[in-house]
Structure formats: structure tokens, C-alpha cells
Amino acid sequence: MADERAAVLPPASGLIAARISLEYGSHEEFAQTVERALARGGDRGATMVAYLDRGDLAIRIPREDGPTWNAVPLVHIQRARTPTADEWGTANAVLEKLERYR
């Protein structure tokens, strides 16, 4: 039984691409991490966030992981579709602003 869903890969350029590589390693490791998060999140999906105090990236599951006051959502990932280039671009712009003020 083949999985028809494409793996979620990070963008090829920008600060967010560099930070994902730093946090998760290779693109394959990032894709595996996202797949595990999507398996936990089911229909709710998963949200990549940046923590304000540390600057770290993380993947949170809506309504499963507790609320957090110090995380900024960057991009929401769902099983049915992968983030678009525009969504990654917006996430990159937000991350650049956060880095400037951190």
C-alpha cells in the first residue's frame, strides 16, 4: 500500500531553511519528524512554532500540547496538503523579524 501523500520538505532558502537544518538536520529527518507529528495530530495537523525566549523551532499539536505564551506560530501543516511557497515565505519573514528583536 503506497502512501500517495508527498513528504513535507522545508524551503530551499531563507532563514527558516537554515534554522530547520540547524534544528532538525537533513531534509529527510525533518520530513520524518513532521510525519510523526502529523500521526499524533491526526486531522488537527501540526504547527511549527518559534519560541520567543530561546529562538528554537518546535512542532506543536493543537489541543494536545498545552498552551504556551512564548511561542509564535509559523506554519500549520495538515495531512491533506503541504505548505505553499507563500506560507513558507510568510513564516520566513516572521522568523526574520523575531531574530531581529531577540
Image (cartoon, grey):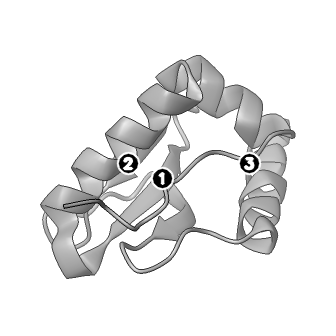
Q: Secondary structure at mark 1?
A: loop
Give the position of the N terminus as an image quadrant: bottom left
- What's the CA distance linking mark 2 and mark 1? 9 Å
Q: Are marks 2 and 1 in contact (CB under 8 Å)?
A: yes
Q: Which residue is mark 2?
A: 34
Q: Which residue is mark 1?
A: 7
- What's the CA distance linking mark 3 and mark 2? 19 Å
Q: Position of residue 39 (x, y in %)?
A: 18, 58
- Give amino acid for label 2: Val
> Residue at coordinates 61% horizontally, 32% vertically from top-left?
20
Q: Would you say 30 lies left or right of 34 here?
A: right
Q: Quadrant of residue 101?
A: top right
Q: Tell me the mark number nearer the camera, choosing from 2 and 1.
A: 1
> Residue at coordinates 14% horizontally, 58% vertically from top-left?
40
Q: Position of residue 74 (x, y in %)?
A: 60, 61
* First along the sequence among labels 3 and 2: 2
Q: Which residue is mark 3?
A: 95
